[in-house]
Image (tube, rainbow, N blue to C red):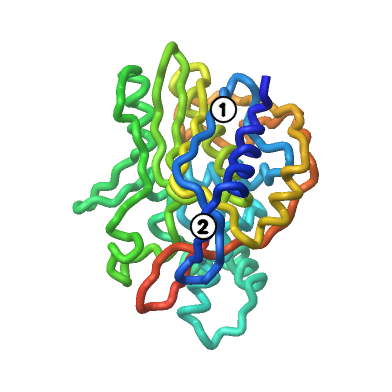
Amino acid sequence: MQHPESQYLDLMKDIMTNGVRKVDRGTTDASYSVFGRQMRFDLNQGFPLLTTKKVYWKGVLHELYWFLSGQSNIKYLVDNNVHIWDDYPFRKYKILNVKSQMLKEEFIEKINTDRKFAEKWGNLPRIYGELWRRWPTKTKKTIDQLKWVVKEVVQDPACHNAIVTSWNPEYLYTMANYKDTSHFPICHNMYQLNVNNGKLSLQLYQRSADIFLGVPFNIASYALLALIIAKIAGYKPGDFIHTFGDVHIYEIHLDQVKEQLKRKPLPLPKVSFNHGFKTIDDFKPEYVTLENYQSHPPIKANLSVTGGYYGKKKNIFEVNL
């Protein structure tokens, strides 16, 4: 049988061979892009944490919990020594405090130690956790999409409507007023649950995907989300299906991709739960155990800060997640 990770490596080869070179209008960074691809992972055949380079598991686990708990302040991540979102509030702080000489390390230390500073400068409105758990409406009411979608698949296993979306045009790109814009892009923007033969599957639609840096993280995060929801809803795990719009390799990552493609996949690890939980709100990161993870060494690369708000005003946030 073909190793499940081979489809990820094959997609990188596809992009290397067939990708069309595109240049981002905001940063002039180039990428090689294909459109409309898909991968499928049977979650009963191992957990799809990539092995041809080491994936930052602690970051996957705590970021997903940050989303699940509906948080929008990075203090939780900083307190757990996860720094994948640090740049966002720091850039906003620098834009609004142009005379400040504060370094990012100092900013993060203040987030960690100064509660009032963290409340003021650590918050990131209208990102995944808020939109999953507290979608804004025209009234003061908010909608808990995640709680609803779990209830829906429990009460109606035949449902076709179990969708969670993070794509709110009111706050995105040139659709938004500048004062309302989220500035950074929502990339993994919609997922749907489905139950067949007692197994729960999750399909993610990712409209824009950095296959080298972002996609390994996204695969693990949404595969884990599928396992968590399956456990809560009382179903066996099914498949995680990752559907892409524009999937690309940045020009600055070509050497790293070539290095990764030389490597052979290792056996996939497994994920188990060491504690019972019955609702999303009962779940905690420490309830997850990652077993037998073997991998090749990490491959470092710089993040290409493309996408996000583009217009007369200068971007504050532009990073693809």
**Three-letter residue code for mark 2:** Asn
- Give the residue number, with chain letter if any, for mark 2: 320
77 relative to 159 in the view: left or right: right
Please, what secondary structure does the residue beneath circle 1 have? strand
41 relative to 125 in the view: left or right: right
* Along the line of sight, the residue nearer the viewer: 282 or 66: 66
Q: Position of residue 11 (x, y in %)?
A: 59, 40
Q: Residue at x 62, y 51 (%)?
A: 213
Q: Residue at x 24, y 50 (%)?
A: 137
Q: Position of residue 61 (x, y in %)?
A: 60, 41
Q: Position of residue 19 (x, y in %)?
A: 55, 51
In this view, the residue farthest toward the top is: 197
- Give the residue number, with chain letter if any, for mark 1: 41
Q: Earlier in the sequence, mark 1 or mark 2?
A: 1
Any part of residue 274 in sight: no
In this view, the residue farthest toward the left is: 139
Above or below, comparing residue 111 to residue 101 in the picture:
above
Indicate the quadrant containing the N terminus: top left, top right, bottom left or bottom right. top right
In this view, the residue farthest toward the bottom is: 99
Please, what secondary structure does the residue beneath circle 2 have? loop
Q: Residues within 10 Å of mark 1 (few under 14, many from 20)?
A: many
Q: Residue at x 36, y 74 (%)?
A: 311
Above or below, comparing residue 77 to residue 24 in the picture:
above
* Along the line of sight, the residue nearer the viewer: 289 or 255: 255
